[in-house]
Amino acid sequence: VLEHISDPVGICRRIFRWLNNDGVFLVSVPNAKSLHRLVAKEMGLLKSEYELNERDHQLGHYRVYDLDLLVADLRSAGFTIASTGGIFLKPLSNGQIEDSWTDEMIEGFFNVGKQFPDYCAEIYAVCTKK
């Protein structure tokens, strides 16, 4: 939910303090560099992949992250990054996918996303205190 919080580093610092020394903090956020946002920029629907669109505002997003921004915020909070990646290669909006995609198509793009994590709809980080 870091995209919904005005001070994500502050919240992450608090989580860092709460976490046991051997604990793990898992973070997943929307990806500014996702395929569908990059295409929207090329189509003129977004001025920048970081611009918040109408749907982002409806959902209460303060920002979208790329992997560098996510890692920087987490490191600023004190975390060590154990691993990062992406989830689901998404070429279209959620509404377009919901309207016309089969379960097999969704599974296929989920699996292909493992090969192209930088362009997935969501990015994640696995964080530790050490």
Image: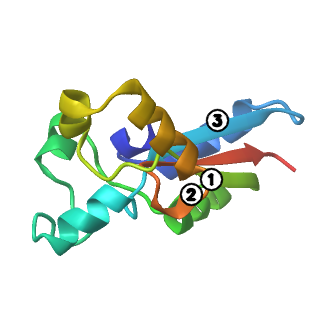
Cα distance in 3D space between marks 3 and 1: 21 Å
List x then y, in percent, for residue 3.
Answer: 38, 45
Dot 3 surroundings within 10 Å: few (below 14), some, or many (20 or more)? some
- Disc 3 residue type (three-letter): Ile
Say if 99 sits above or below 89 in the image. above
- Which of the two discs, 3 and 1, sits closer to the camera? 1
Q: Which residue is mark 3?
A: 15
- Disc 1 residue type (three-letter): Gly
Cα distance in 3D space between marks 3 and 2: 26 Å
The front one of 77 and 62 is: 62
Q: Which residue is mark 2?
A: 117
Q: State yes or no: discs 3 and 2 in contact (Cβ < 8 Å).
A: no
Dot 3 or dot 1: first in sequence order is: 3
Q: Which residue is mark 1?
A: 85
Name the side, left or right, on which 51 lies relative to 79: left
List x then y, in percent, for residue 48.
Answer: 23, 72
For residue 46, which numbered disc appears in the image? none
